Image (cartoon, rainbow, N blue to C red):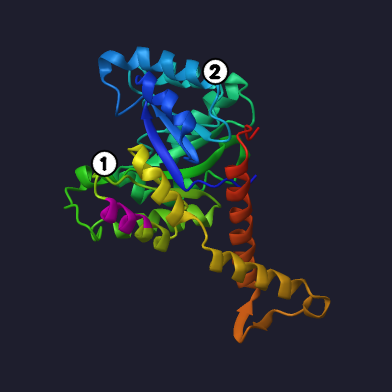
């Protein structure tokens, strides 16, 4: 099923009040975090609270992802087993630097007998992860690996590379583009990194537009105030949806069944434009359904 992943909000796993508040937010997805936002002294408490919240439900149609600690840490394996028992929609694997980080995690998931709906998301946040983005993405077509999405960790990339942060993201654009193209080659979604100044509305909106121009499916968020503008930017506009339906309608006509190129309202369109139009129409339909129901996706 095609899912809108416009707004993906991080919530610390040890913040019970914040977890409750997410149930009323229009975010497409919630990442409940056990890693960076949780202090070592709170790791075990966060694991218990997060998995209990997932079991209780109440998140409606929002996609729920649990970010675990790296397997090699004292908490990683316990996090993974607890996550599998709680059955979120996906598990976000942090610090993915090579394909083995995904295939190794997938083997644990398979051995546990976890339900097929549980997917793996990969956090791309290290220089090695960027270098190996193609090999990591290549895990996607194998259903045993369950890989469906990349999440960019731009703060960590800046830290590790010693690059300077800037409003136009000059330093990180090549890395974002490399990762996105690798993901698309293997059919994966890609979620952009966070914008740290949640009080800078104009700057945030500009970075959302920048991410959408690059081809991102959505953006990770650190504050509820970022959800609405993010949804707006990453949703197809009325004009885009209308044009998509015109293209689809034109190719559906019997006389055009064998044609590769058509003229629609004075503009040349090819079958590649039909594929693009079909996705725009499908994501618009999914967004509309998402806004009308609070029923679970599965």
Q: Which residue is mark 1?
A: 156
Q: Which is closer to the viewer, label 1 or label 2?
A: 2
Question: From this viewpoint, is residue 13 visible?
Answer: no
Image point (64%, 33%), residue name: 295
Relative to the observer, which residue lies in front, 3 or 75?
Answer: 3
Q: Main secondary structure of the magenta part?
A: helix
Residue 209: give x, y in percent of width and height.
Answer: 37, 60
Q: Which residue is mark 2?
A: 56
Say if 216 sits above or below 154 in the image. Answer: below
Say if 212 sits above or below 224 in the image. Answer: below
Answer with the quarter of the image where residue 89 lies.
Answer: top right
Q: Is residue 255 left or right of residue 56?
A: right
Q: Earlier in the sequence, mark 1 or mark 2?
A: 2
Residue 139: give x, y in percent of width and height.
Answer: 52, 43
Label 1's element? helix
Answer with the quarter of the image where residue 99 lies.
Answer: top left
Q: Which mark is residue 25?
A: none
Q: Is residue 158 left or right of residue 83?
A: left
């Amino acid at each position: 099923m095609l899912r809108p992943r416009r707004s993906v909000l991080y919530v610390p796993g040890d913040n019970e009040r914040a977890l409750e508040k997410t149930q009323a937010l229009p975010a497409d997805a919630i990442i409940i975090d056990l890693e960076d936002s949780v202090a070592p002294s709170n790791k075990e408490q966060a694991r218990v609270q997060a998995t209990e919240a997932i079991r209780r439900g109440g998140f409606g149609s929002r996609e729920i992802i649990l970010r675990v600690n790296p397997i090699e840490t004292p908490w990683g394996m316990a996090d993974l087993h607890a996550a599998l028992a709680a059955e979120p929609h996906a598990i976000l694997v942090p610090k993915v630097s090579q394909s083995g980080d995904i295939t190794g995690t997938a083997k644990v998931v398979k051995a546990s007998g976890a339900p097929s709906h549980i997917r793996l998301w990969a956090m791309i946040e290290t220089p090695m992860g960027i270098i190996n983005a193609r090999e990591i993405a290549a895990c996607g077509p194998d259903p045993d690996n369950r890989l469906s999405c990349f999440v960019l960790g731009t703060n960590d990339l800046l830290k590790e590379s010693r690059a300077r942060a800037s409003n136009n993201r000059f330093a990180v654009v090549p890395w974002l583009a490399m990762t996105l193209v690798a993901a698309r080659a293997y059919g994966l979604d890609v979620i952009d990194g966070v914008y740290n100044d949640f009080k800078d509305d104009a700057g945030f909106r500009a970075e959302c537009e920048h991410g959408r121009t690059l081809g991102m499916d959505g953006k990770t968020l650190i504050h509820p105030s970022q959800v609405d503008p993010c949804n707006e930017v990453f949703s197809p506009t009325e004009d885009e949806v209308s044009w998509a339906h015109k293209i689809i309608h034109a190719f559906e006509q019997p006389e055009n069944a064998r044609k590769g190129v058509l003229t629609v309202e004075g503009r040349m369109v090819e079958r590649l434009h039909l594929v693009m139009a079909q996705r725009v129409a499908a994501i618009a339909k999914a967004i509309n359904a998402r806004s009308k129901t609070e029923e679970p996706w599965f």
